Image (cartoon, helix red, strand yellow):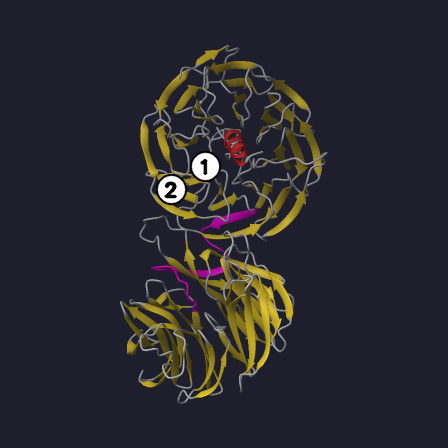
Amino acid sequence: MSENTRRTFLKTVGLAVGGASVAGASGALDSTHVTASDNPSTLAGQDWSTFLYDAANTGNPPGDGLPEPPFGWSERLSEEEISNPAVVDDVAYVVDATVTTIAFDIETREVLWRATPDMDGELYSYGSPPTVADGTVLTTAEGMIFAQDAEDGNNLWQFEADSQRTPSVTVVDGTVYATAHRTGTKCYALNLADGSVRWEFEPNEPRANVPAVVDGVAYFRGRNAVYALDAEDGTELWRIDGLSRSGGSPSVADGSIFIVDDTELRAFSTDDGSEQWTVQVDEGSLDMDSTPAVADGKVYVSGSGRSGSIYVYDAEDGSEVWNSWETLANTATLTIAGGNIYTGGDPIRVFDASSGDAQWQYYPRGTVEFAPTVVNESVYAGDNFGYLYVFSATDDRTNWRFVTDETVETSPEVIDDTLYAVDDSGSLYAIDTESGGEKWKIDGSYDEQTYVDGTVYAYSRDGRERHIIAVDSEDGIVEWKTAVDGNVGDYEVADGTIYVSQQYAPEETLLYALDAETGDIEWTFGSDHSTGDRATSVAVSNGIVYLGETENLWALSAGDGCVEWQVSDGGFTRDSTVVVSDGIVYATERHFTQNRDKSAEIFAFDASDGTTLWSKKIPDTTDVNGLTVTDGSVYASVIDDSGELGEKPPRLVALEAETGDERWTISPTSYLRVSEAVVYDDTIYIGSNRRVDAYSTDDGTELEHWEVMGTVRAKPAVTDDAIYASAGTFIYPPYSERAESGHVYSFRRDD
């Protein structure tokens, strides 16, 4: 099936309709008006156990929802697309594209079971979420309905409809209501206990949608009609004829049936199907597969396309309450909870239901087909990369989250009870590690802070001026600043001196040595020795400064900058990282052979004389963006960004420090890059796309991960009881006050 066809089917079956007529009322109906909150078919408690929340298809669960930017986490449950979950008793049930049902414990974050129905050949699930009722999980695929035990996934029964398509089902009082179409078209009522047919009804036109069942009446959408059937025996009570072929499933509330009918939103009486009102939405603006959501006397429908509006109307008379193209509904279903509107798509978006004002958003790794599941103060969604996302107001693995003015792409540094970090606006922060509160902040154009002996050093950019500054760690007062000629590549503080490497320095100065107490220049290096124009990484050990630049690796006396030794290899240290450990200097380089094979190379040199000890090419790599050496191992974070985004995942490579022999290689769960690694207590910590990941140093086995609402580009900081990470974020709406904000996180670290 083509992607376009599949998406059209998803939107059509998952949702829910000028002139229409009412035909054949065959009996008197109870005229009691029904709302989602007092509807006897609404599911009890605080669960979400069926598509669009309740049997009336209102999409309006109780609870406060999640109006503020949340904490979030995710687990990959399948390599295939997964549906949004049904959530019952803190267990999330999803179905993937292979019709495998997965039960996931939300509290422990563990898969309880996986089960695939007994069937001949392969079937494909179209993303319709499961329904859970009376200990049974119901899923659908290609004209089949499957029942599995919610406790262990055992197959209970299956039903084959005379059809090729079956969307989600509705369950009320032990009866399963379903539609099926394509080769055959019928409305079914099945016994939940064993799947036996109670009754079936064959409408005039084919259409698959999710039926609404309220007060003993089952409402089915045909292609050109809505049918009201006696829920007990399937007798047609009346129908609404003359509808267009465009529209999703019906929703029922307050004595009205609400349907999308091409570019119109229409309301009909549940008593006899008589028309109550019709509104014409801007032509081409209404998502013609939309199912109306109903909450607090209002009807919500989504606009078409990725830039579609949300339209809100009074449920009683159809008068417009508001609409706004800025709401950008990305799915044909909406969830209304706690005074907010939740949409699926890419990104997931949340709006104030009374005004349409944006509250928060989140970009999943893939696309979320339907509006999210909302239970109490938690939001759940599944995407087409197989990830389940959970958003909540709190997170038991997070100590605190600090909001910065802009994205943070540098590593945090933790000293005693204070964390120091710099954001992209250049502000330097001191944050209390216990409370997450701000101790002090200085605005400026700072970058890459480091702490030594009560002083925080940072690189400052102000127009064309470049400075190294020293700041008192207690109060944030600037003690001194010293101008340097070019962009700063790296710097390190050792034995009372700051060594600052330069990139594209006008005076061809590759390295400054500054007095750490006063900022006075002690010596410089570059113009008399180097043929390159850019220095990168700098490392200091045992009185020697090791400097990488575009054509050489230098060993310089830390006292006066005199050359101890030099290694030249045609630019092997361009954009390099230099690390010194146990008498060995490690340096990295991109390497492109004449036949254009890509590789990055890691070199090991004797620190005393520059003798090459070994070199190791890492194939299919365009860059080494992090190098860590500890406990006899070298850990290289490598990427190959030559393909499409996500096509070639980044890797973490472990080598023997003495020989360069490969120990193991892993591809962390990320579609971008991984940060430089930190090793603490035999565990490797790296930042990645949306996560800080922990791996065993023995074999690279994943041990744990912590979630951020963005991307961790710089290495985390680790202490005995916490992990600290800085991140960009994409949870704040565009053009909002915090649209460019970043986060600093403190996570709980268990032994």
Q: Does the rendering let one see residue 440?
A: no
Which quadrant, please, contains the N terminus? top right
Which amino acid does the dot numbered 1 rest on?
Thr
Residue 496 as seen in the image, left or right of residue 167: left
Which of discs 1 and 2 lies nearer the camera? The answer is 1
Q: Nearer the viewer, residue 248 or 416?
A: 248
Position in image of residue 12 (x %, y %): 51, 29
Q: Secondary structure at mark 2?
A: strand
* Three-letter amino acid code at the position of disc 2: Phe
Which element type, helix, strand or loop, lies under badge 1? loop
Q: Answer above or below: position of 717 versus 271.
A: below
Q: Which residue is mark 2?
A: 351
Residue 390 magenta-highlighted: yes
* Percent coordinates x, y for residue 373 in the rendering: 50, 41
Residue pointed to by mark 1:
331
Foreground of the two, 231 or 411: 411
Q: Is residue 433 magenta?
A: no
Tell me where the magenta segment starts and ends, as one range.
386-412
Identified at 54% across, 26% down, the residue is: 211
Instruction: Give the image location of residue 534, x and y in percent.
Output: 40, 73
User: Is the residue 732 above or below the residue 127 in the image?
Assistant: below
Of pointers 1 and 2, the one earlier in the residue sequence:
1
Kindly identify the residue that appears in the image at 35 percent across and 29 percent down: 313
- Residue 285 is situated, as x and y percent measured from the top left of the image, at 37, 30
How many numbered circles are shown? 2
Q: Quadrant of the C terminus?
A: bottom right
